[in-house]
Image (spheres, helix red, strand yellow):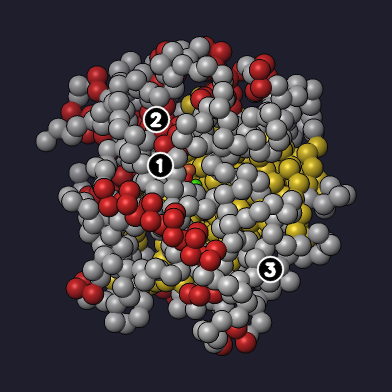
Amino acid sequence: MEEPVSALPQLPIHPLGRAALTCQYRCGNACAHEAPNASENEYFADVVATVLDRRGVLRAGAVLAVSAAGAAMLPGVARASGAAAGDAQLAPEPPGTRFTPVAPNRLDEVVTAQGYRQRIVIRWGDPVLPGAPEFDFAAQNEERQSQQFGYNNDYCGLVPLDNRRWLMVNNHEYTNELLMWRNYDPANPTERQVRTSWAAHGMSVVVVERDPHGGLRVVLDPHYNRRITATTEFDVRGPAAGSALLRTAADPTGRVVLGTLNNCAGAVTPWGTVLSGEENFNQYFANAGLVTDPVTRARLARYGLPAGPSDRRWENFDPRFDLAAEPNEANRFGWIVEIDPRSPGERPVKHTALGRFKHEGATIQVARDGRVVAYLGDDERFDYMYKFVSDGVLLPGGSRRAREHNKRLLDAGTLYAARFTGDSPPSEIDGSGTLPSDGEFDGTGTWIPLARNDVSFVPGFTAEEVYVFTRLAADAVGATKMDRPEDVEPNPHNGRIYAALTNNTRRGTTGQPGPDEANPRNVNRHGHLLELEENGGDHTGTAFTWRLLLVCGDPDAPDTYFAGFDKTQVSPISSPDNVAFDRYGNLWISTDGNALGSNDGLFSVPLAGPHRGHVKQFLTVPIGGETCGPIIEDDFVLVSVQHPGEVDGASADNPASRWPDGPGSQPRSAVVAVFPSRGGRLGV
Ligand code: FEO
Ligand code: CA
Ligand code: CA
């Protein structure tokens, strides 16, 4: 049967916690097809009104962090002592997590735990290339922007350059033209506006060094500093390179693509390159509704390509964004890309062996036999988790030969999708979040092979089709529909894999999949954290066990779970997105779209010992912003503050945030360093 292509204009219906403005520009209203649910709205009002109030009023004796500026805050969580004293309160907190948590708040600033300072490292529009002009909101254009730090930085990676400098690599996920231009007309953007947005997308490479006053500062390095934009040439590699599915009028080879779009999360590889996920690429393309071939239409529908004009109207200025004119151009996005920041003259790569979907990111684990494993999430409601296992093995060391060899490891290997099976009776997984009688949401799982190079394991699919239309292949093998897989990262400390399932308010609603043990809550507003352990510790294997570490939300709500830790002691957490690990093996989580009414934040969680599950908020970001790209070093943290001020009703003429430049300014996304005021290590 012919699949309908999603219709435009779409209704502005959004998950809780994220502004409609963010939904439109970040993911092209990915969830807008969902039916509104009156009880959701009631619930949202209840939560905002009661959680903040209850935590402020009823939690007398709470230990409150105060902002660096001493501003008034909404009171917070984490009793210093209480009725539920247990082992954890007697045991010292593990190193890395010894700080007083920050209370939920809605302040227009970065609020850190007491005893920490902060410094802006770089903001949207700051010079990246030597000689680049300084930011001037009124003078934006493509030429200036292509030399400056891009818009809405998401992932942030540090690649050591020498003993005092790093190459900092940032993704610029998306642009919000309503906040970039005064009097912006979404239906009729100018060529200058569109070209500026092309330059504001992509990635930046910037040399950074320690600032003597704390944190990091930018070096305008003429050799390494680099901008990658929507028009930079990328090589396509791997099994689908050159495929007819990737050929266009402008590129009959199917091997060279202009640009990378909607780059979300990422990782530094063991060989010193950076991987970055092309996520909601669909929103940049127009006119899927004009495509008549039913097979092509079904493929476009599975990836959510819009039927009519795109939100940004890029098709008005480059016909490759018009699917009616160039149906294959969209197939050239949705990949994991790799950039070698040490080789500024080298083209970045799109890796077809890692499949095509709305890639959140990719993180690498080196298996015992030296093969490398990439863990992958497809950030869409009811979509899948994946992994890739290389054919080749890692060559140790940093020699030129080793580096060139290792930079080919993602060209060939096997791509798998994940199936999760709970170990409790389905009758005990009722969608309420109530733990089953064995006390955990847990079970076993299988990695289902999809393809290895030119061999497809999916009946009815060629290998090329598996790689280019990976979602459809994973549908065919019965992968488990998850609640929006975001970061999926191995913890080097314990070898386990941690996946953020950010939320899914459609779970269990009419006509949608119901709960399963890996996604146990209907109308999952706050998401959960999954811990996965490969059998025998073999990351190349096909069998694993798993359990939910956290079921997020208000700790006072019965449907939340913090690895069995005393819920009166934890910070509320909602919509986990990115994960990272510190030197001690503690998990750090950043959030995107706090549906409890607070600003987003960064949280630490011990994974071992009596404090396992003890979630604590380390910082919060300004109003309307998202916390992402966290890097947890020994003596500083870097966070990306993405889309500050992106609140419904906001515009360049009516800014909702003045962060970071203060009164009279427009909000600017930025990288922020946070470090102990007195030096030394974090959290000790
Ligand atoms: Fe761009 Fe899945 O967050
Ligand atoms: Ca169970
Ligand atoms: Ca993300």
Q: In which quarter of the image is the N terminus?
A: top left
Instruction: Indicate the secondary structure of the residue bearing disc 2.
Output: helix
Circles 1 and 2, Cβ within 8 Å, touching? The answer is no
Q: How would you rate the neighbour count of disc 1 (Cα within 10 Å): few for under 14, some for 14-19, many for 20 or more?
A: many
Which mark, by number, is residue 283? Answer: 2
- Say whether residue 172 is visible: no
Q: What residue type is labelled 1?
A: Lys
Q: Earlier in the sequence, mark 1 or mark 2?
A: 2
Q: Which of marks 1 and 3 is nearer the N terminus?
A: 3
C-alpha separation, residue under disc 1 versus residue under disc 3:
36 Å
Q: In which quarter of the image is residue 98?
A: bottom right
Q: Earlier in the sequence, mark 2 or mark 3?
A: 3
Residue behind mark 1: 358
Nearer to us of marks 1 and 2 is 2
Q: Does the residue labelled 3 lie within 8 Å of ligand 3?
A: no
Instruction: Indicate the secondary structure of the residue bearing disc 1.
Output: loop
Which mark, by number, is residue 146? Answer: none
Q: In which quarter of the image is residue 292?
A: top left
Residue behind mark 3: 99
